[in-house]
Image (cartoon, helix red, strand yellow):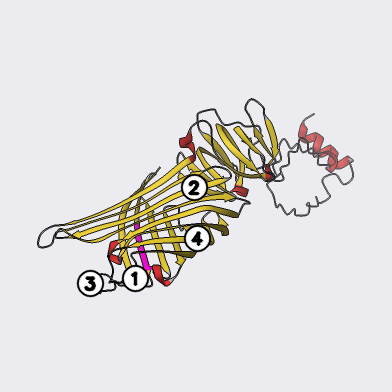
Amino acid sequence: MSLAAVLVWLVAVVPGFGAETVVPLPPVVVTNCVFVTNIVVVTVTNYVVTTNVALSINTPTSALPDLSWVPPVDGYDWIQLKSGEWLRGQIKAMQQRQLEFDSEELNDLTFDWKDIRQVRSAHTLDLLFMDGKKAAGPVTITPAEVAVGGAEPRVFSRDQLQSLTPGGSKELNYWSGMLSVGLTVRAGNTEQLEYNAQARLQRRTPATRFSLDYIGNISSINGVENANNNRVNSEFDLWLSRRFYLILPQIEYYQDPFQNLKARVTAGGGAGYDLVDHPNLEWNISTGPAYQYAWFEPTEPGQPTQSGTAALVFGTRFDWDITQRIGLILEYRGQYTSRQVGETTHHAVGTLSLELTKRFDLDVSLIWDRISNPKVGQDDVQPKPDDFRLVVGLGVHF
């Protein structure tokens, strides 16, 4: 019997077969992606059967790689951000809850410590913890722990880590620096030579910071010197907490014959505090007592050629990374002393730095020096209290 005849017979024999209207299924609102495979429909007795239905409902997956992944041992330090990205380069320091990192691809970077998920370093790092404990060795840092390798491996809680710096047997690992030089040469009707230099040298360990700064300016016109001043500042900081530190000691040397100042030495101590501590913005203040001694160029008759007195030293430093390639540094130092050595003195430097390459910057600096009461010279002329200089130089970091 043919299939057509069977269907005719079913319509005639089975009541309602093929006569009832198939009621459509109510509409389904789909909010996620649904995949249905291998649907089998059997039309006997008006039943619908489905088999092997696969349903996907956008199940969330972790955006971060597994902690078990280990970067290769390739002579570099590795850090992992909260986003899960790994960066390869060299750890410079972690102090004040900020990690300074020299990326192999992105140059010098600064991260807030809370944005760092993992650290892997096969190099020896020196670590300082909140309770004063110290450790040194290869380091593995996870979200919860700090594991220090070496002859006696140890494990610490990550939230107790205060700072870390590169260590080991090489003293060079503790040092970093900057040098910026500007030169102006003019020939013709007027022969002019002007030299400007700025330098900064710094040594850091987890608990200490030593800095040495220099600013110099020498200028001559037609062979006659018309500017010659040099300033050297040295400071040793001892961290007592993440933001508070002692300054023991701080020393400044300054000389400017055109201010009738042959030499001036200021030595003292004090304390400092970080008002703002962010990856791209730092602002600290410091103050303390000091003693100042000054030697003067030959002055008017009856005036002393040298004098010493107590002083109050105060200062601040503002460091802002405006963009990844442009930075602004504002620094001020003041000294309040007696009228015998010039009364209040001020020194301020504002530097706008543009990164040219990984190591070289273009620096534009405005420098202000003021001696409120400069000494009168042998010619009975009192120098002006303020000096301003605009310096453009090429800087190198190391």
For the residue pair 84 and 313, the one nearer the viewer reads as 313
Which of the two discs, 2 and 3, labels the residue nearer the N terminus? 2
| Front residue (pair 353, 201) | 201
- Select label 2 or label 1 by which is in front: 1
Contact (CB < 8 A) between labels 2 and 1?
no
Q: Which mark is residue 109?
A: none
> Which quarter of the rendered picture does the N terminus lie within?
top right
- Residue at left 33%, top 59%? 255
- Mark 3 or mark 1: name the one nearer the start of the chain: 1
Q: Could you give the CA–CA distance between mark 2 and mark 3, rounded to whole angstroms?
A: 42 Å
Which comes before the other along the chain, label 2 or label 1?
2
Q: CA distance from mark 3 to mark 4?
A: 32 Å
Which segment is the magenta one? 364-370
Q: Nearer the viewer, residue 71 or 377?
A: 377
Identify the secondary structure beneath mark 2.
strand
Amino acid carrying mark 3 in the image: Asp
Q: How crowded is the residue under tag 4: few (<14 C-alpha within 10 Å), some, or many (20+)?
A: many
Q: Which residue is mark 2?
A: 210
- Around disc 3, counting alpha carbons within 10 Å, would you say few (fewer than 14), some (14 to 19), or many (20 or more)? few
Amino acid type, label 1: Pro
Q: Mark 1 sits on what residue?
A: 374
* Disc 4 target residue: 290
The image shows residue 271, relative to residue 63, as above or below, that is: below
Element type at marker 4?
strand
Judged from the image, the secondary structure of the residue bearing numbered disc 3 is loop
Label 4 vs 2, first from the N-terminus: 2
Q: CA distance from mark 1 to mark 4?
A: 20 Å
Residue 25 painted magenta: no
Which is more N-terminal, label 4 or label 1? Answer: 4
Q: Quadrant of residue 69?
A: top right
Q: Nearer the viewer, mark 4 or mark 2?
A: 4
Asked if the residues shown at circle 3 and circle 4 are in contact, with their CB atoms under 8 angstroms apart, the answer is no
